[in-house]
Amino acid sequence: MKLLKSIFLVLFISNACNAQWQKSTLDIEHTSGVMNFNDKVIVGTSGDGIYYSTTDEETWVKYSNEFDSVGDKFSVYKFYQFEDLYACTDVGLFRLSKGEENWEYLNQGKFRAFYKGDGYLLSVPIDGEKLLRSTDDGHTWEVIDSDWTYAFMTIINYKNSLLGAHDKGLYQSFDKGLTWIKIDDYSNTFELKVSDNKIYRATNSGILISEGNIDEWTNIGPSAQFINDFTVFDDLLIISGYNNGLVCKNKNSNGWVRSDLGLKGDGVYEVKATNVIGDKVFTTNNSGLWIRDLNDFYIPQLEVTKLVEFNEKPEVGDSSFTHFSLSNNGFDTLFITDIISDNPNFRVWSKNFALAPNSGWSNVITYKPTNAGKEDATLKIIAKNNKYGNNNTVKVYAEALPTKFALNQNYPNPFNPSTVISYDLPNNGFVELKVYDILGKEVANLVNEEQQSGNYKVEFNASSFSSGIYFYRVVSGNNSMIRKMVLLR
């Protein structure tokens, strides 16, 4: 096998995303598989049989009557969906046909791998020492090979052939599983799936992808991940793992995102199976069945505080400080190479640093205003190895206090029919803002209240006034100023 390239990936968590996994109402701790079939969510358990729910996922019903011959306290190893749904369990093989309500018990075989072809079935027993084939719908089986060679962990259909894989390599069959050709000896393949004409191969060193040539594979990571199951949905790839919980990535990106926030229990890091059903993602582990919105999985690699406001209002010429956060809950170090501000009044202290795995960073912003009033800035974070989610910006808002009392010229001036009057208050106090005509008669009272120090803007609408010269006057404590404005109709 030719391994074209290995991409070393950074794994991040979205700390800003409040959504987490929610435990379902199914009161069973040990769940092992979840499928969508016959308009039902079907869940396999470890030791308590099979349950189903309609689309509300609120009410769960246990399949029981059809299991009278074996009891309903069995464990489901894995579901396999073809035209019908098959359940491999510790008491035998069951089938739920499309449109039917009850399971059919096929035989007592305990299988770890299963495949349904056109007129035949293939299976590998739990002991993993032979490959079996059935042509009578699974009621009787013949041994194709009694050697460990074909004791596959997974079997799939691909381009008019079959692919089988296990810890000894990848094999291909062109005669419905009767004979097999060895393709490579890449070890420890747990699962094979096909999506968009690509083969996805789960191994203990990550996911391998082949784009049509099964002699060439690309490792897209993540490393050190024992994979129980994975789901390819739309442009998402979601991995259920033994030692690293649950991670996902956009198929067209190089970034893996940690996605097990909120999962609980002793088995949290051994996620058994995951499936996308409608607009929700279901996952199973040793503490139950968990549900999360699908949109929560579209998460950028690097997560930063999106909005920052300065609580302190400095005077013009003075400085104020606040901070924003960056997080990296990944496996590798993230390198921040620059943080660019589009407003020189806002400066970031640290612009070039390394963000270690599973860590966060609180970065300081300095605001030194040159004029009174409100202003903002956009900070752009540049990360050297941030492959997915490059729109990492922080919006910053601040306000500066004036150092002296001032009444500014209205704008626009001349105006018709509205204009804006602004003034600066260096101290708290009672404020009056009034408008007078050219004869000195008061024609409008715009402000008459206590106000905090700061910069203020007031709109004056003169739609009911005639053209001419008007005066506006602001008074606060011992301070008073007056200016002229012109209304042109």
Image: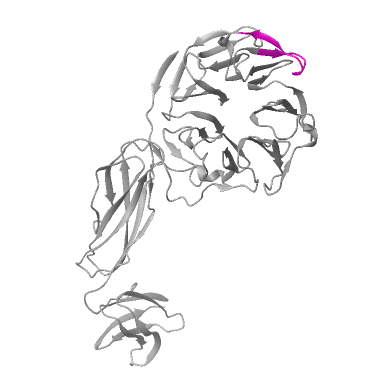
The quadrant of the picture occupied by the N terminus is: top left
On the picture, is 179 further left or further right than 210? right
- Residue 76 in percent (x, y) is at 65, 31
Q: What color scheme is it? A: one colour
Extreme residue toward the left, this view: 317
Residue 261 can be seen, yes or no? yes
- Against 143, residue 450 (above or below) is below
- Against 161, residue 66 (above or below) is below
Quadrant of res 428: bottom left
- Against 82, residue 385 (above or below) is below
Question: Residue drawn 66% across and 11% down?
Answer: 176
Question: Residue drawn 73% across and 35% down?
Answer: 72
Which one is nearer the viewer's eye here, 290 or 177? 290
Task: Please tell me how many numbered marks the rendered image carries.
Answer: 0
Q: Is residue 142 magenta?
A: yes
Quadrant of res 343: bottom left
- Residue 342 in percent (x, y) is at 28, 53
- Against 460, residue 120 (above or below) is above
Which one is nearer the viewer's eye here, 69 or 122? 69
Q: Which residues are magenta?
A: 132-146
- Residue 48 in percent (x, y) is at 68, 37
On the picture, is 214 further left or further right than 98? left
Which one is nearer the viewer's eye here, 243 or 236? 243
On the picture, is 64 further left or further right than 289? right
Residue 415 can be seen, yes or no? no
Q: Is residue 3 magenta?
A: no
- Residue 277 in percent (x, y) is at 63, 39
The quadrant of the picture occupied by the C terminus is: bottom left
